[in-house]
Amino acid sequence: MKQLFLHIGTLKTGSTSIQGYLEDHIKQLEDQGFSLYEGSHMPVNHIELFLAAMRYERDSFAKLKLQNRFAFDESYTESIRQRVNRFIDTNPCQKVILTTEGLCLLRYDDEVDRLKSILGESASNTTIILYLRNKADYLKSYTRQLLKVRGRLPSDHPESSLYVEEDSWLWDYESLIALFARGFGKENVKVIDYDLEKQSRGTVLPSFLETIGYR
């Protein structure tokens, strides 16, 4: 059974920096027994994981962008399941890194169950890496990201990922942690304070590399 490290965001907490470092250090990672899953839509932001796990009727930035190219349904999920399982099973490295901040959008037990099926038998040997940012700054940064795309506007539907009022589920960290703790085990969910890392180190990279055991 492989050891999986699954970085799930949250959004706006340095995920691009983490993914960029991983992409630039693939050889060094392999030398220490790590492999970085190669994404089907984006090489190092594995958005297919949450697109395949999320309830099909739910929205997200990525779904809105890709909805004219892909049908997000059971067939899509099965194709991603086969692709991910094949990579994990055939890769010679014992430790596999998967990363997409979109996984922080999961909010239902059946979504996490679907994610675990995508990861295969190694799902039971998975470390979840979650960064949390103070809610006020997260709201501001996420809202700016939403508005960057012309015509993409906030939603007034409380269940939408485009709903950015102060009571949005997007900033309900307690429910997010509890969801992944139920699915993967409380002891396997590593929660890291984004603001503290930025203040003390200027970047989230050291904490991520320490968590996976990369030296």
Image (cartoon, rainbow, N blue to C red):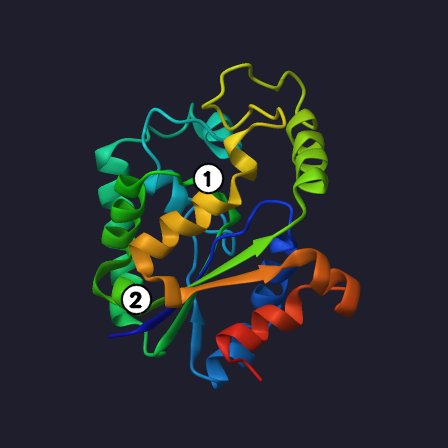
Rendered location of residue 125, percent (x, y): 30, 70
Check disc 2 and report its element: helix, strand or loop. Answer: helix
Q: Name the residue rendered at 31%, 63% in the picture.
A: 87
Image quadrant in which the C terminus is located: bottom right
Task: State the CA–CA distance, disc 1 to disc 2.
Answer: 24 Å
Answer few, some or many: residues within 10 Å of disc 2's Cα (few below 14, many 20 plus, some between 14 and 19).
many
With 143 as the anchor, is 169 left or right in this view? Answer: left
Instruction: Kindly indicate the quadrant of the structure image that contains residue 183.
Output: bottom left
Check disc 1 and report its element: helix, strand or loop. Answer: helix
Instruction: Kindly indicate the quadrant of the structure image that contains residue 181.
Output: bottom left
Q: Which residue is mark 1?
A: 105
Rendered location of residue 46, percent (x, y): 45, 51
Rendered location of residue 97, percent (x, y): 44, 66
Instruction: Kindly indicate the quadrant of the structure image that contains residue 59.
Output: top left
With 35 as the anchor, is 203 left or right in this view? Answer: right
**Which comes sooner in the sequence, label 1 or label 2?**
2
